[in-house]
Structure formats: structure tokens, C-alpha cells
């Protein structure tokens, strides 16, 4: 059985550049001809001249945080999608709200390659603990697993005792989901005295995969690898057995740019991840993810020859990914609007014991009403779909630095 998913992973740099010189002009011409937004933003661009990643640098960046307003102006996808209802298989909603289309192509999100690198093979049973509700995470992993010839158990989130029972009965080979939820499932299995000897591999995403968590899984006999993906783009990069950063997927072009600009930075310099896809249904050209990362020099010792990134290193703006979900400053404002007792609020994200924790500090006067902390916590969960601790503080005590969301997680 091959070590690699396909021959594209081990192409020479000249072969990869030659393929880009053909595919990039075609994709840009397609986007201009079939989407309103790119028809306008790229109307002065000669598609035939965009034959390399360097040539892309002259094109405008459309950033994730722009999508909310763009989609309000032109529903449902802000003029960025080339396919319509009937041509699409599904449409998803992420917090914001931001709507994402899914086309009908097999392995639409390009996940099979990342799963293969993590050791998944045809005939495996995959326990999928990403959410099947509204957001695309579960479907992103399911599509890749099915393309490999795996069978998927659609576990979703929650109901940990029932999930462990299903794992004992079905004996899955692999897990996909967030690393924090895998730890929760394993701890629940320990509480129940349940053994899961069949579970030997995992592909995790949606949050940072910290070395202590990776080592904890290895100690249990589970080799965990991470994939970097977004709801708009699918898989962008993935970890291999070399564990030397994340290899960029063959179906995208990745640039690292200075935050707030479209200017590429030098190898090793941290900047915003900007991605161009070859997706015909949603042909995103220079899509600014808002995520921070950096290119690593050279190629991986695993033999895959595409460029590598360090992985997810935080956000270029205040929008923050927590437990696989994006939380926006606009959502903090919505919480404040629900509770007139709050004058200002600041959401601080930490990760004690490698688990994400949200704490919302709210400035509130003496006239606070009954059960205010609980009511605010309920609003946070309703708006963000995540739990938060709520702390009431004196008016004027929060820092006057313009921050609404502070990401204080440690990644060392």
C-alpha cells in the first residue's frame, strides 16, 4: 500500500509550478465569468497573466470578516458562489451568520488526503464527533472518509455516555473531531470502566492540538494528527508522520501576508493565511482566513514536497476560534445589547489544562437585577453556541484598549 495518497504529493517544484500556470488562469476566468463579486473586483485583471502564486499578490483579498456584510448585501453567498440551489448538495450556517455552500463533487472539501496521512484506510470505521447541526465540520470529515472507503458513525457532540457505549459496541478504528472532545470521551470511558482497544488513530481539527494532548493520546495508543481547515475552504493543510508543521494541500494555493494588507511576508514571518482554491462551486480567490501562521523553510522529511506552514497560531483580527467555532466581536455586542445593565464587556479566552475556557467580564452598575450572571451566560450560549463563565466587574475597571475579545491561550 502506498505511503502517499497520490502522486501529486511528491511532485517536483517545477511540476507543481507548471500545473499552477495552467489552473490559476482557468480558475480566475471562471470566477470572473460566474460570480458577481469577482466579476467586479477582478474586472481589470487579465486572467491569463495570473500564472503563479507571486502573480496572485497583485489581486485584492476578500477577508472572512467581510462575508457577514457581503452576504447581507447579496444573499445568500455575497456574490462569491458560482453554483445555485439544485447544483449544490447542502448549505451550512456558521456563527455570524455566514453561509457556506457544499457542491456535489466527491470529497468536496479535500479531506481524504489529510485522513490518509493520519493513517486512515479503506475499511476503517470512523467515529465522527464533529457537529452535524448547521455547521459543516462533520460533513467535511465525512466526505473525505467516505471517499477513502471508510464507514462513518455520525456521533456528533454531546451524549458522551451513549457515544462511549457505541464505541465499545462498534469498535471504531479512528476518531475525527476536536482533540478536547476526544479527551472527554476517553475520560468518560475510564469512568465507566470501558475499554477501547480498537481506537488507534485520530484526525483532529477545530482547535489547537497541543503537544501535551498529543502525547496523552499516544500514551493511550492513539496516534493523533491535525488538519487545518475552514468552513469556506475545507482542508488547507495537514500533519504527517514527520510532525514538522502542516503540509499544504494540493488543491489550494496558500500565501502568508502581512495582516491588514495583501503583501506576502518572508518565510518564517508570521502573517495572515490567504488561500486561493480551485473549487468550481465556490471559487474563492485570495480568501483571507483571518488566521495567523508562517511558512517553514524547505520540505518535509516525510517526502511530501509542497510548502509547509507552522499551523494555526491565532487570529489576525479579534474574531477567535474556540472549540471549533468562531466567536466574533459582533456576537459580544449582541450579548451586551440583550442586557442594558452591561456598559462594556471583554471576552477572555484561556486554555487551562489544554481545554478552551471563555470568561466574559461585564462592567455593570449597582442596579444589576436578579440572576444577571446566569442570564448573561444563557445569552452567550444562545448567541455563540458555547458556554462561558461570566464575571461582573465595576464600571470603568476593564482596560480601555479597544479589545472586545482577548485570546490569552498559550501554545508553547
Image (spheres, rainbow, N blue to C red):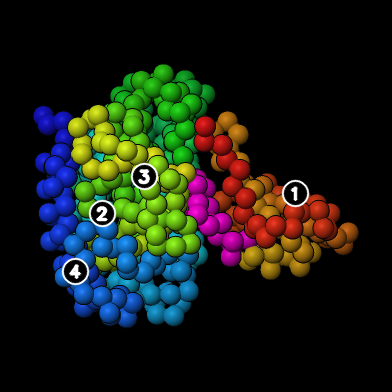
Residue 216 visible to the viewer = yes
Residue 20 lies, with reference to residue 324, above or below; the image says below
Residue 121 lies, with reference to residue 262, above or below; the image says above
Position of the N terminus, as image quadrant, is top left
Residue placed under numbered mark 2 in the picture: 252
Mark 2 Cα shell of 10 Å, populated few (<14), some (14-19), many (≥20): many
CB atoms of marks 4 and 3 within 8 Å: no
Residue placed under numbered mark 4 in the picture: 49
Q: Dot 3: what SS? A: loop
CB atoms of marks 1 and 2 within 8 Å: no
Residue 85 position, x and y percent, is: 27, 74
Mark 4 or 3, nearer chain start: 4
Mark 1 or 3, nearer chain start: 3
Residue in the picture at 43% in, 69% down: 67
Q: Dot 4: what SS? A: helix
Residue 144 position, x and y percent, is: 24, 46
Residue 287 lies, with reference to residue 40, above or below; the image says above
Residue placed under numbered mark 3 in the picture: 267
Residue 266 forms part of the magenta stretch:
no
Mark 1 Cα shell of 10 Å, populated few (<14), some (14-19), many (≥20): some
Amino acid at each position: 500500500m502506498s505511503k502517499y495518497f497520490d502522486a501529486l504529493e511528491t511532485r517536483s517544484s517545477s511540476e507543481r509550478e507548471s500545473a499552477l500556470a495552467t489552473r490559476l488562469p482557468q480558475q480566475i476566468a471562471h470566477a470572473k465569468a460566474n460570480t458577481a463579486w469577482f466579476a467586479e473586483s477582478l474586472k481589470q485583471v487579465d486572467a491569463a497573466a495570473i500564472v503563479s502564486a507571486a502573480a496572485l499578490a497583485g489581486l485584492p483579498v476578500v477577508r472572512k470578516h467581510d462575508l457577514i456584510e457581503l452576504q447581507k448585501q447579496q444573499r445568500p453567498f455575497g456574490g462569491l458562489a458560482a453554483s445555485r440551489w439544485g447544483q449544490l448538495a447542502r448549505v451550512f450556517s456558521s456563527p455570524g451568520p455566514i453561509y457556506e455552500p457544499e457542491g456535489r463533487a466527491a470529497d468536496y472539501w479535500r479531506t481524504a488526503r489529510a485522513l490518509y496521512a493520519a493513517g486512515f484506510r479503506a475499511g476503517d470505521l470512523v467515529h465522527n464527533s464533529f457537529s452535524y447541526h448547521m455547521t459543516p465540520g462533520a460533513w467535511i470529515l465525512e466526505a473525505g472518509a467516505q471517499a477513502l472507503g471508510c464507514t462513518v458513525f455520525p456521533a456528533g457532540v454531546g451524549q458522551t455516555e451513549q457515544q462511549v457505549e457505541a464505541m465499545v459496541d462498534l469498535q471504531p478504528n479512528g476518531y475525527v473531531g476536536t482533540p478536547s472532545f476526544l479527551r472527554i470521551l476517553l475520560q468518560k470511558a475510564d469512568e465507566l470502566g470501558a475499554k477501547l482497544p480498537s481506537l488507534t488513530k485520530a484526525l483532529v481539527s477545530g482547535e489547537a492540538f497541543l503537544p501535551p494532548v498529543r502525547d496523552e493520546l499516544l500514551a493511550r495508543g492513539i496516534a493523533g494528527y491535525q488538519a487545518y481547515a475552514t468552513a469556506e475552504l475545507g482542508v488547507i493543510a495537514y500533519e504527517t508522520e514527520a510532525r514538522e508543521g502542516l503540509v499544504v494541500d494540493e488543491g489550494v494555493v496558500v500565501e502568508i501576508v502581512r495582516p491588514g494588507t495583501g503583501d506576502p511576508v518572508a518565510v518564517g514571518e508570521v502573517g495572515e493565511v490567504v488561500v486561493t482554491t480551485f473549487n468550481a462551486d465556490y471559487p474563492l480567490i485570495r480568501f483571507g482566513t483571518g488566521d495567523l501562521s508562517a511558512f517553514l523553510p524547505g520540505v518535509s522529511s516525510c517526502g511530501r514536497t509542497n510548502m509547509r506552514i507552522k499551523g494555526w497560531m491565532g487570529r489576525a483580527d479579534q474574531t477567535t476560534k474556540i472549540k471549533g467555532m468562531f466567536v466574533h466581536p459582533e456576537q459580544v455586542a449582541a450579548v451586551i445589547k440583550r442586557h442594558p445593565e452591561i456598559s462594556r464587556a471583554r471576552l477572555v479566552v484561556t486554555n487551562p489544562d489544554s481545554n478552551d475556557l471563555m470568561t466574559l467580564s461585564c462592567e455593570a452598575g449597582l442596579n444589576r437585577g436578579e440572576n444577571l450572571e446566569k442570564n448573561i451566560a444563557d445569552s452567550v450560549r444562545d448567541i455563540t453556541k458555547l458556554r462561558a463563565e461570566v464575571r461582573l466587574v465595576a464600571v470603568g475597571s476593564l482596560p480601555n484598549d479597544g479589545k472586545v475579545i482577548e485570546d490569552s491561550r498559550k501554545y508553547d
